[in-house]
Amino acid sequence: QLQLQESGPGLVKSSETLSLTCTVSGGSISSKNYFWGWIRQPPGKGLEWIGIGTIYYSGRTHYNPSLRSRVTISVDTSKNQFSLKLTSVTAADTAVYYCARISTVSDSSGYYLDAFDIWGRGTMVTVSA
Amino acid sequence: SYELTQSPSVSVFPGQTASITCSGDKLRDKYVCWYQQKPGQSPILIIYQDTKRPSGIPERFSGSNSGNTASLTISGTQPMDEADYYCQAWDGSTGVFGTGTKVTVL
């Protein structure tokens, strides 16, 4: 059974870079029908999509337009991990960060993104002044 | 940017039907997913492609999508269904989550 586990610092200083890793176990990150992504949830608030990536389709990535200038998602097949980097953080970036698998469906024109079907347990990241 | 709007809260008695709506422009042209999140836990997928249930999700959860509104229905609501529910869709390659609905079982 596929499982995802987030890891990284729980405290990041303002203006620095937030770096998180998601380790995939019980399956391969190289599976073609999936993207891998990050979602966050500020305390007491709703879910916010950060972005997704895959090693396929020329290493395609898609990012939340509001975060695009600060976000990088990369996939490391050798470690069966994917990562998130968010630069120039502020208090507004304080949140629980989730990693997730995104299923896709292929058709004659390519693929379309489907559901966040497996989630990690989340990790709380606090940005300090 | 594309937005999905949900009513903030729904209250229901045990055994009754709870209906949660998710509104967005021409939502019928997109597939909608629904996620359940209990306090302190990560979300779980309960509906995908508007109407499909993943393995292990009870039949009392059902979904629909028409016009500008998608709906999640919980038939015969149980106390364990008390949670936050989020709809989600893709606007091209951009993921969008709804604002969330808190379901309270009275």
Image (cartoon, rainbow, N blue to C red):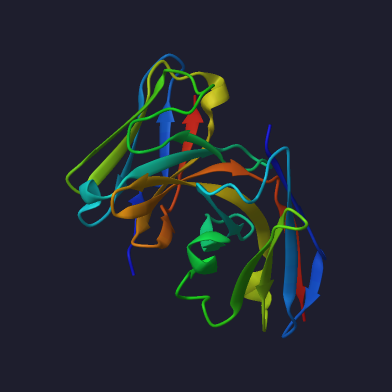
Please give the name of the residue rendered at 75% of the width and 83% of the height, measured from the top-left corner.
Answer: A16
The residue closer to the viewer here, A26 or B82, is A26
Looking at the picture, how far across and down is residue A41, in whole percent? 60, 57
Q: Quadrant of residue B83?
A: top right
The residue closer to the viewer here, A29 or B103, is A29
Please give the name of the residue rendered at 50% of the width and 18% of the height, measured from the top-left corner.
Answer: B78
**A93 versus A6 height, above or below:** below
Please give the name of the residue rendered at 64% of the width and 58% of the height, measured from the top-left corner.
Answer: A43
Whether residue B14 sits left or right of residue A119 in the image: it is: left
Q: How many marks?
A: 0
The residue closer to the viewer here, B99 or B48, is B48
Looking at the picture, how far across and down is residue B57, in whole percent? 50, 23
Looking at the picture, how far across and down is residue A24, in whole percent? 72, 47
**A77 versus B79 height, above or below:** below
Going by the picture, which residue comes out furthest to the left? B67
**A93 versus B19 height, above or below:** below
Please give the name of the residue rendered at 43% of the width and 14% of the height, measured from the top-left corner.
Answer: B15
The image quadrant where one finds the N terminus of chain B is bottom left
Q: Quadrant of residue A128?
A: bottom right
Looking at the picture, how far across and down is residue A101, in whole percent? 58, 48
